[in-house]
Structure formats: structure tokens, C-alpha cells
Image: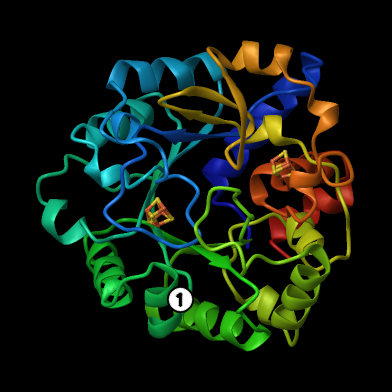
């Protein structure tokens, strides 16, 4: 599906500015992780294994805003951990919106009912909730290792939509998925729940994740998405990805990794090279760009990247390829 007009214009202008300034590396979106603590313990999670001394830390608002300002990124996805466990999460969101950043607040939704009336966040064209849903009831509850989470998330999505918020979802697929389980969950989110947009991702094999047996290989991923997208599903679903990234997922196109386009900033600093792997941290985005050997990463270069088809590495590549081609730009505007 096409991006909303305001967002397309802002991102298009931003990309043009980078081109005119001959910047070959720049951030499209920052993954901001202002805490690692979470109220769930999903088996595929690579974040909650930090030591207790790190898990209890919360990033100060000024630090979060300064990092985003320094990077210059037009979009920010706030994740973690569970961002609603941060006592000043609404202040971070408000300050980013005031700077006209497009903000995506990721949540497992378990705290929405308890916190929503206390949060000072209003619907805005610059703001969207992103609720984590990995499958229909049984699959989702199994993925997050807790019963009742799916029902709570569905209730929260309906409540947030009733309050006038834009609500998207983020769904991660594992090798226990089939084309039909993908179709079932995306049909449910698209048609029954009526979420505004859906993000999809093959799970990345975090070295620290407790469950190492259910990550997808590249060929498995391509086949899975090719079959799931068949019969007009891809066109019908409101997927929040560029057409070229969806082509990439189903194996019609291939790209090099451009992880500098979706960098991650957390309590530990700017993570090298991406939010999936941690080969050290830089203090600033400029330092991250200048001191990382970007050519050492990506499929065929680093064995840890072998099965990665994550959006943080390949969506920026798809967006840059889109803006370099008139035909692809027209496709992206049409959302086909
Ligand atoms: S909800 Fe997200 S951060 Fe929390 S345990 Fe699950 S994957 Fe990790
Ligand atoms: S391929 Fe890119 S995004 Fe994926 S793990 Fe490697 S560096 Fe990170």
C-alpha cells in the first residue's frame, strides 16, 4: 500500500536532500530502544537477556531526543523491551512529534488498558501505535509464551482505534508458519480488525534467543511469502512496505544490506551494525557511520547475516532503489 501523502512528501524531500548533498549513508528511520525491560518473555526475543543492571535502566528523555536530532532521521520507531514500561514514554513521543518526526510506538499491548488514560499522547498524522501480533490466538500466545496475550492485544487495538489513533501491527514469522497461517493472520488483521497498516518480517536468528530451532532460511522465507502473497493477497493487504521490499521477500529481487539506513540507538549507544547484531556501540550516529566497516556485513559476507531478510537491512536498500527509478517510484505511489 502507498504511504500517506504527508509522509511520502516528507520522506521524498528528505531523500532528495541526501542525494543533492551527495550523502551516501543516512538514516531513514531510527530504532529507538529507551529500555530493555519487558513484561513478557517471548522465546524468540534477543533483548531481554541483558543483565538486571541494564534491564532496570530507563533512557532520559533529553538523551533520546538528542540522539534522534543528531541523526536527522525523519522517522522513529520506539521499541525495547516494552516502551509502555518507560515512565516518560509519552514525553518522548510528544517531543518527537513536535519536531515533525513520524513516530511508531511498538508495544505488546499488555499495558495499554492500564496506561492509556494516563498517557498524554493524542492522535496525530505523525503518530502510530504498532502492536506486536505473531499469529492468531494459539500461535501468538505460543510465540509470546503466555496465554491470553492475543485477546488482550486485539482488545487494545479496537480501543486505540475507537480513540482515533492510527494503529498498525508488526508480525514476525518463524519456520513453524505456513502460507496458510500467514494468510489467516493477515486476513484477520486486514479485514476483521481493520488495522491501518501491517508490517511483516521473517524472524532473525538472534544468537541470544532461547529458542534457536524455529528461524527461517532465505529459500524457506522466499517460498513462504511467494505462496502467501499469491492470488491477489499482496495487493489487497495494507502492507506497510515498499513494493520492492515485498519483491525481495518473495525472491523476485535481491539487494545488499544497507543497515546504516535503519540504525538502532539504545541505552548502550548506537549499535553496530544493526539492531539484530551487537559488534560494539558508538556514541553518535556520525561515529557509527565513520567507524563501522559496512562492507563486512550482509549475506555472503558475515555468517551471522546468512539468513537475514529483515527490514532494518533491506528496506532502506529497497527504498533507495525505488527513488532511483521512475517506474519503481510510480509503483510505490500506487502501492502495487
Ligand atoms: S514483547 Fe518484544 S521485547 Fe518483550 S519479550 Fe517479546 S519480543 Fe521481547
Ligand atoms: S544482513 Fe544486515 S540487517 Fe541483517 S543481521 Fe546482517 S547487518 Fe544486520
Residue depicted at x 32% and y 34%: 93
Disc 1 crowd rating (10 Å Cα; few below 14, some 14-19, many 20+) is many
In the shown orientation, is residue 51 left or right of residue 67? Answer: left
Residue depicted at x 55% and y 13%: 284
All told, the count of numbered labels is 1
Front-most of 55 and 7? 55
Looking at the rendering, the quadrant in which ligand 1 lies is bottom left
- Position of residue 249 relative to residue 289, above or below, is below
The spot of residue 327 in percent (x, y) is 88, 52
In the shown orientation, is residue 69 left or right of residue 131? Answer: right
The spot of residue 293 in percent (x, y) is 79, 21
Residue 283 in view, yes or no: yes
The spot of residue 121 in percent (x, y) is 23, 42
In the shown orientation, is residue 117 left or right of residue 57? Answer: left
In the shown orientation, is residue 149 left or right of residue 113? Answer: right
Is the CB atom of the residue marked by disc 1 within 8 angstroms of ligand 1's nearest atom?
no
- Position of residue 13 relative to residue 321, above or below, is above
Q: Which residue is mark 1?
A: 189
Residue depicted at x 79% and y 70%: 222
**Is the C terminus in the top left, top right, bottom left or bottom right quadrant?**
bottom right
**Within the image, what quadrant is residue 297 found in?**
top right
**Is the N terminus in the top left, top right, bottom left or bottom right quadrant?**
bottom right
**Within the image, what quadrant is residue 218 found in?**
bottom right
- Position of residue 304 relative to residue 56, above or below, is below
Front-most of 40 and 20? 40
Residue depicted at x 40% and y 46%: 48
Amino acid at each position: 500500500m502507498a504511504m500517506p501523502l504527508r509522509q511520502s512528501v516528507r520522506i521524498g524531500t528528505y531523500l532528495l536532500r541526501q542525494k543533492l548533498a551527495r550523502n551516501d549513508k543516512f538514516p531513514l528511520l531510527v530504532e529507538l530502544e529507551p529500555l530493555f525491560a519487558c513484561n513478557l518473555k517471548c522465546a524468540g526475543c534477543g533483548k531481554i537477556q541483558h543483565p538486571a543492571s541494564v534491564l532496570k535502566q530507563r533512557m532520559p528523555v533529553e538523551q533520546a531526543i538528542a540522539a534522534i536530532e543528531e541523526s536527522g532521521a525523519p522517522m522513529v520507531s520506539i521499541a525495547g523491551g516494552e516502551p509502555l514500561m518507560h515512565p516518560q514514554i509519552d514525553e518522548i513521543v510528544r517531543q518527537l512529534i513536535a519536531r515533525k518526526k513520524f513516530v511508531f510506538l511498538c508495544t505488546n499491548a499488555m499495558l495499554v488498558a492500564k496506561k492509556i488514560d494516563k498517557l498524554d499522547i493524542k492522535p496525530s498524522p505523525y503518530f502510530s501505535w504498532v502492536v506486536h501480533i505473531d499469529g492468531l490466538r494459539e500461535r501468538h500466545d505460543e510465540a509470546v509464551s503466555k496465554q491470553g496475550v492475543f485477546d488482550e492485544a486485539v482488545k487494545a487495538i479496537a480501543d486505540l482505534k475507537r480513540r482515533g489513533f492510527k494503529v498498525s501491527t508488526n508480525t514476525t514469522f518463524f519456520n513453524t508458519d505456513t502460507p496458510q497461517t500467514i494468510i489467516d493472520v493477515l486476513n484477520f488483521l486486514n479485514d476483521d480488525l481493520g488495522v491501518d497498516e501491517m508490517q511483516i518480517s521473517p524472524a532473525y536468528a538472534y544468537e541470544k534467543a532461547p529458542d534457536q530451532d524455529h528461524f527461517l532460511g532465505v529459500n524457506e522465507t522466499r517460498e513462504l511469502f511467494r505462496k502467501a502473497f499469491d492470488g491477489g493477497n499482496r495487493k489487497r493487504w495494507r502492507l506497510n512496505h515498499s513494493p520492492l521490499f515485498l519483491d525481495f521477500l518473495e525472491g523476485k529481487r535481491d539487494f545488499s544490506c544497507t543497515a546504516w539506513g535503519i540504525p538502532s540507538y539504545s541505552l548502550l549507544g548506537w549499535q553496530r551494525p544493526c539492531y539484530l547484531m551487537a559488534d560494539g556501540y558508538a556514541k553518535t550516529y556520525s561515529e557509527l557511520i565513520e567507524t563501522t566497516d559496512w562492507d563486512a556485513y550482509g549475506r555472503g559476507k558475515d555468517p551471522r547475516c546468512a539468513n537475514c531478510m529483515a527490514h532494518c537491512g533491506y528496506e532502506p536498500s529497497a527504498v533507495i532503489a525505488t527513488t532511483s527509478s521512475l517506474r519503481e517510484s510510480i509503483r510505490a505511489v500506487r502501492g502495487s
